[in-house]
Image (spheres, rainbow, N blue to C red):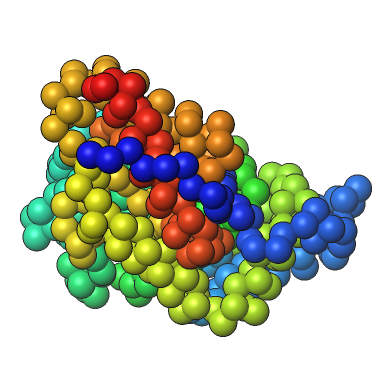
Amino acid sequence: MTIAAKPNTRPKNPNFSSGPCAKRPGWRVSALSGALVGRSHRAKPAKLRIQEVSDRSRAILGIPEDYYIGIVPGSDTGAMEMAMWSMLGARGVDMLAWESFGDGWVTDVVKQLKLEDVRTLKADYGALPDLSQVDFGRDVIFTWNGTTSGVRVPNGDWIPGEREGLTFCDATSAVFAMDLAWSKLDVITYSWQKVLGGEAQHGMLILSPRAVQRLESYTPPWPMPKLFRMAKGGKFNADIFSGATINTVSMLCVEDAIDALKWVEGEGGQGALIQRSEANLSALANWVEKTEWVEFLAKEDSTRSCTSICLTIVADWFTALDAGAQTAASKKIVSLLDTEGAAFDVGAYRDAPPGLRIWGGATIETADIESLCPWLEWAYGQVMAELVG
C-alpha cells in the first residue's frame, strides 16, 4: 500500500469528541452574557429561564404535551439512575445491552438494586440483540443509540403502542439527531453535551403519563436518596418538572442550553439536525467504502449510528496483532491526529474493540468530516509503516 502524503488542509474544527461534543458552529463565550449568574435558581426570572429549556425542547422534538420534562443532576447518568431507582421493581425487567452504557444499566439493576426477575438480552459490539425476544409485559430498558459501539435501533417499530410495562430509553446520543418514537417511550433521558454541544452535568428526564402513574402507585422497598425522590406520600412532585429543580443548577449551563436550542430553531428544527448528522455519516461512509483497511463496527447499515460513528481496522497486519498491540496501534493513530491538530479525542471507548470513534452529530460540519478523512489515511499509513515496515 502506498503511504498517503500528509494533507495540506485540516478540519476547521478538529473537535470530534463523543462527549462533551463540539459546540454549535459560531459559538462564542459571549453567547452566555445574558446568564443570570449570582441569582438564586429559585428566583422567578431564573425559573422562567429553566422552564424555557424544557419548552423549547418540547417544541423542537415534538414531545407530547402530556409528558413531563425536567432538568436533573448528574447528566444522562443521573437521569437514568433517578428513573431506575424510583420506578423499577414493580414488575420483571428486560435489559438490552450491546455496549458499555447498556452493560452499566444491567450492573445497576442486577448488582445494586438486586432485582430478582431480570432478563438480560445482550449482543456483542457491532450488533443488536434480537429485538423480537423483548417482552413488553415487563419493564424494558435500552439505549436508542449505543454511544460506545456506534449501533442504534433502526426505529421504534419493534415497540408496541399498547404494553403493560414501561419503556426506559437512554437517548443521550440519539435525541436531536434521530427520530425517536416518543409515544412508545415512557422514560427518556439525555444530556445537553451530545448533539446540542452543551455543557455537562445536567440531565434531561422526560416522563410519560404511564411513568407518572408508576411513581404514584409504587414505592420501592429500598432507601431513596434525596436527589432521586420524585414522589412524596404517593403523590408525584410535578414542581421539579416546571422550573423548580430538585437541586441547584448552573445558570451558565442553562443559558448555554438555550443558546443551543435557539441555534437548532434557526437551522430549521429537529429535521435539519437529523439531515446534518446523516450527511456527516454519509461523508464518512463514502470514504470507508473506498478504503480497504477500515470498516464500520456496526454490522448492519440500518443500525449504523450517525452520531457516535465507530470504525474498526480490518487490515491483515492489524488483525494479526494481539488485543494489546491492536489497542496500542490504534492509540498511535489517535495520537498522531491529535499532535497534528487534525482531530481530537477520536479513540475508541476504553471498553470497545480497538479502533476509532468519530462524532458526527449536528454541530459537526460535513466539510470537516471530509477534511478529516485524508488525515485518517495519513495517520494510518504512518503507523503501518512503523509497525510493518
Q: Is residue 161 above or below residue 91?
A: below
Residue drawn 37% across and 31% down? Answer: 382
The quarter of the picture where residue 351 lies is top left
- Does the image show residue 105? no
Q: Position of residue 316 (x, y in %)?
A: 14, 32
Q: Is residue 167 above or below residue 114?
A: below
The tally of labels here is 0
Quick one: quadrant of the C terminus? top left
Return the residue nearer the eye: 230 or 57: 57
Residue drawn 56% across and 36% down? Answer: 340
Q: Position of residue 172 (x, y in %)?
A: 45, 53
The quarter of the picture where residue 222 lies is top left
Residue drawn 47% across and 70% down? Answer: 276
Q: Residue furthest bottom?
A: 268
Return the residue nearer the eye: 382 or 29: 382
Q: Position of residue 242 (x, y in %)?
A: 66, 65
Return the residue nearer the eye: 191 or 248: 191
- Does the image show residue 183? yes
Q: Tell me: 262 left or right of 223.
A: right
The quarter of the picture where residue 134 lies is bottom left
Q: Position of residue 1 (x, y in %)?
A: 23, 39
Q: Tell me: 289 left or right of 82.
A: left
Residue drawn 80% across and 53% down? Answer: 29
Return the residue nearer the eye: 371 or 349: 371
